[in-house]
Amino acid sequence: MPWYNDCKATVQTDVPLAPKTWYQLGGPARWYCEPSSIEELAELIACCHQEGIGWRVLGHGANILVSDAGVDGLVIQLTHDSYCETLWDGGLLNVGGGVDFPKLCKQAVSRGLAGLDRLAGIPGTVGGITRMNAGGRYGSVAEFVQSVDYLSPQGQQQTKTAEECDFSYRRSNLGDGIVLSVAMRFEPGDKESLTKEHQRIWKEKSVEQPPMALRSAGCIFKNPHGDAAGRLIDACGLKGHRIRGAEISNRHANFILAHPDARASDVIELATYAKDRVQSEFGIPLEFEVEIW
Ligand code: EPU
């Protein structure tokens, strides 16, 4: 009898993950589920905990590289409406973990609320964005977070204040928790100037970074303290460097692009090569920003 037999949620087997990620690479999930309520999710997680089954939550796959072997565990996606609610109350927001972050940024701007205009062009779900404290040159999401509701790895619903999440550059301590919803707070701003700023940042990114239509997962490495991974890889002369189907972008050296014939192992090999070169030329250890599954 399969381990999930007593769970209400529908679990599928051998589900391809590549189409669910921006890289469109990698193998299948041994088990896959889109639970239709928090209760179903909690039951599933509690069951995994009991049976020793590993699980991961997939957002929109914008910062993930699935290995060619795939995931030998359960992959969960919070696509159901119950994780995708957006409740505004003046400058206060309660937003589901499954909500699309770029759409949320647009909504905040059109409501004349300041802050998310500066986080234009960051793909992903609210849950994924919060968990990794995603951001860019003009700030990161933690600036707006008041508290996070999450499911513990044992399947219990809990809340952490922003302080308890211990946010820092591209990091929080929510690692093992599943973000259910996030409370955020924004100051009012001038709708017209927020719209302009939002559009300006989109344009800036489209000039400095490879087009979103090319397959990547954004920046492959975190920036080391006081420097930029892109600058370091560029200084090693690696722009355009290729290993089989993977290529370091000519526009921004912290992006590794996947060509149609690429395999996940090509991207990993090229990233490892760039990391080794930066280590030997500058003595700086780069750390992956992209999660490799
Ligand atoms: N640089 C180079 N060569 C390159 C790329 C960059 O010399 O090929 C130099 C730039 O000239 C600049 C410095 O490196 O002096 C930093 O580059 P940039 O301003 O493009 O920013 P970044 O630090 O590389 C960060 C975020 C991006 C975000 C941008 C813009 C990280 C790892 N990256 O990039 O986020 O879009 O700022 O806000 O923090 C991501 O997280 O996936 C991501 C793309």
Image (tube, rainbow, N blue to C red):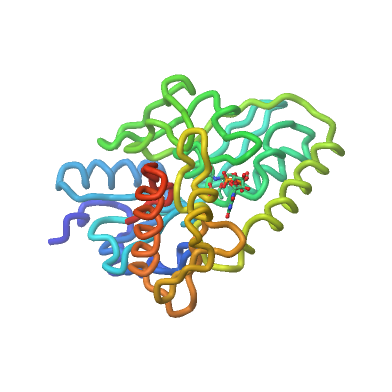
Give the percent coordinates (x, y) of residue 133: 50, 36
In the displayed structure image, the side of residue 185 where residue 223 appears, left or right: left
Decide which of 227, 30 is in the foreground and name it.
227
What residue appears at the point 26 percent right and 64 percent down from the top-left corner? Answer: 30
Which of the two residues, 252 or 153, is positioned nearer the viewer here? 252
Residue 244, relative to residue 42: is it above or below?
below
Residue for point 71% across, 57% down:
207
34 displayed left or right of 255: left
How many discs mark residues in the rendered view?
0
**Extreme-front residue of the structure:** 281
Point out the residue furthest to the left here.
Answer: 1
Between 285 and 27, the one nearer to me in the picture: 285
User: Extreme bottom residue here?
Assistant: 261
Look at the image and tell me in which quarter the N terminus lies: bottom left
The residue sitting at 45% across, 49% down in the picture is 221
Residue 267 position by quadrant: bottom left
Q: Is residue 261 above or below residue 277?
A: below
Figure quadrant of the C terminus: bottom left
In the image, residue 180 above or below residue 266: above
Left or right of residue 133: residue 55: left
User: Could you say which is closer to the camera, residue 242 or residue 170?
Assistant: 242
Q: Specify whether residue 138 is in view.
A: yes
Question: Where is residue 276, by image quadrant?
Answer: bottom left
**Residue 63 location (% of width, % of height):** 46, 53
Q: Residue at x 81, y 42 (%)?
A: 195
- The picture places residue 48, in percent across and down from the top left corner, at 22, 47
Task: Find the residue positioned furthest to the right.
Answer: 192
Position of residue 143 measured from the top left corner of the image (x, y, whole percent): 59, 27
Q: Is residue 15 visible?
A: no
Q: In the shown orientation, is residue 195 left or right of residue 174?
A: right
Picture layout, residue 261 above or below residue 240 = below
